Image (cartoon, coloured by chain):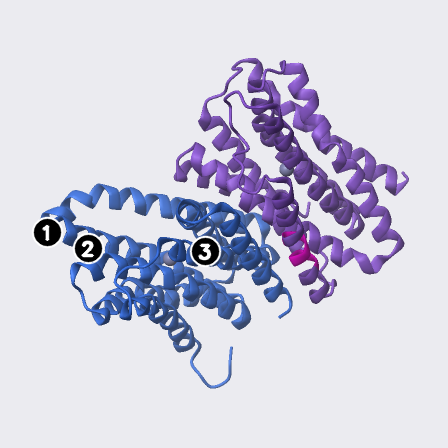
Chain colours: A blue, B purple
Amino acid sequence: MTDGMNPSLLVFLYGLATALATGLGAIPFLWMRSVERRGAALANAVAAGLMLGACFGLVSEGSGYGRWQTVAGGLLGVLFILATQRILAGREPSVADVADEAGARKVLLMIVVMTVHSFAEGVAVGAAFGGGVALGGIITVAIAVHNIPEGLAISAVMRPRGASVASCALWSVVSSLPQPVMAVPAYLFVESFRPALPWALGFAAGAMFFMVFQELLPDAYEDAPRPQVGLVTSLTLVAMVLFQRSL
Amino acid sequence: MNPTLTVLIYSSVAAVTGGIGSLPLAFRSSPPTRWLGWANALAAGTMLGVAYVLSASEPGARAWELAAGSIVGVLFVHGVQRAAGTLSLDLNRLEQEEAVYGYKVLLATALHAASEGVAIGAAMLVNLPLGIFMALAIALHNIPEGLALAAVLRAQGLTLGHAASLTVAANLNQVLFAVVTFALAQAAPGLLPWALGVAVGSLVQIVMTDLFSHAYRQDGHTSVALAAVSALGMVVLLSGG
Ligand SMILES: [Zn+2]
Ligand SMILES: [Zn+2]
């Protein structure tokens, strides 16, 4: 990797950068009490385009090492997301026991959901660095940008309940801390066990594709006009794909 | 075989499979909304996979021409959808509508088919296996798309036979666009990256405006996501032979 710096440290720092980006989602609340739904939806559309473009990059890199392994890894990524969602759905009542007030419960639940969801994204950052610094940088940027609307969503739930902007930002960052934490072991794993690389790249792509299809896109279509969402997502996607090709 | 003839044959196969999609309607003349949701999600996943395979092909192609081509593709489809009035039209309404509604839906399908034709023609020029793969992937994609279209046409009062043949007819310009793209880019190889770019951009724009937006209203987010991601994975798995 790059000269001088310990590669694991570098991966950790990139993962940390994506986590810190989540905190940026709290910034609009410095001057407003609630966000316009359409704005949040279009932010999701941009994030969806970037993530899809990044997934194209992961699949193409993974296919270079082994196509069926990449696709099989993708299947595991989808199953991982489905399994975590099922487990969380089962735990929902116990979260309610901890906090009896409905509002607090909603905040807590949201932070838990976001935290679990960050696991797969951390694996994506780490695995991508196994494919080279350029791919790692691309995936980091895509996930960092996608984290901003997630921070926005957390802040939008917390801020009306009287939380300060600083604590909105703090909790947003906390929800993404699994990213640097998971990125390092994922990176070390693919570096020391190369045959796992296409599996890991595929896992990251499968999980991210699924999240985009299941959450980001439908959320975007719900709150903004379809022509705008379509155009924003398409342009972001092709821009991301071509940006990666030109590296 | 004459290469143009190859393009003609394979793109015709892709156009004709749209008719197969109408077969389930022989059992259920008015399909449940969820069927349409799956159909749209499968069509979206295959088409996104096709766009991926095209964008990853031809590593030698100059990046800025591809980039310009794909932005042209996105904006061109957006412009045609706007001009045709299909940009925010619900393309899968199964209630009785005025005849103009049926025409608009056919028009939207013809626009899909044109973009798919450009994709087949450009892929055939990159290399023959890629072109054949592209034609077969689009043939597969046309089956669920044909189901949604035939369901709308049936609801307009057409017989199953009529609906099936109109579905094929709406896809026929695919053959024309495939052959013209192939011939043009063969004559002027500098056009190939542009054609690839236009195909990627227009396919992505159709997936995002027409296919996903309908699927989410017709079925749950999780099953749409599962159908789309499986179709996409299948295309990636089979690509590159
Ligand atoms: Zn996320
Ligand atoms: Zn189509």
Q: Is residue A218 above or below residue A138?
A: above
Q: Position of residue B111 (x, y in %)?
A: 68, 40
Q: Is residue B236 visible?
A: no
Q: Name the amino acid type tagged 2.
A: Leu
Q: Name the amino acid type tagged 1.
A: Val
Report helix, strand or loop for mark 2: helix
Taking the image as four quarters, which one is ligand 2 found in? Answer: top right
Mark 3 surroundings: few (<14), some (14-19) or many (≥20) residues within 10 A: many
Region rendered in magenta? B69-74
Q: Is residue B157 left or right of residue A151?
A: right
- Residue at the disc numbered 2: A108
Query: Which residue occupies the extreme bottom position in the image?
Result: A4
Q: Give the chain letter at badge 2.
A: A
Q: Residue at x 48, y 64 (%)?
A: A139
Q: Is residue A211 left or right of residue A230?
A: left
Real-space Cα distance between discs 3 and 1? 33 Å
Pointers 2 and 1 within a single chain: yes
Dividing the picture into quadrants, the one containing residue B179 is: top right
Mark 1 CB in 8 Å range of ligand 1? no
User: Which quadrant of the rendered structure holds the C terminus of chain A?
Assistant: bottom right
Q: Position of residue B183 (x, y in %)?
A: 86, 47
Q: Give the chain letter at badge 3.
A: A
Earlier along the polypeptide chain: callout 3 or callout 1? Answer: 1
- Residue at the disc numbered 3: A204
Report helix, strand or loop for mark 1: helix
> Would you say the magenta stretch is mainly helix, strand or loop?
helix
- Residue at the disc numbered 1: A98
Q: Residue at x 43, y 65 (%)?
A: A145
**Disc 2 and disc 1 in contact, CB within 8 angstroms:** yes
**Disc 3 and disc 1 in contact, CB within 8 angstroms:** no
**Disc 2 and disc 3 in contact, CB within 8 angstroms:** no
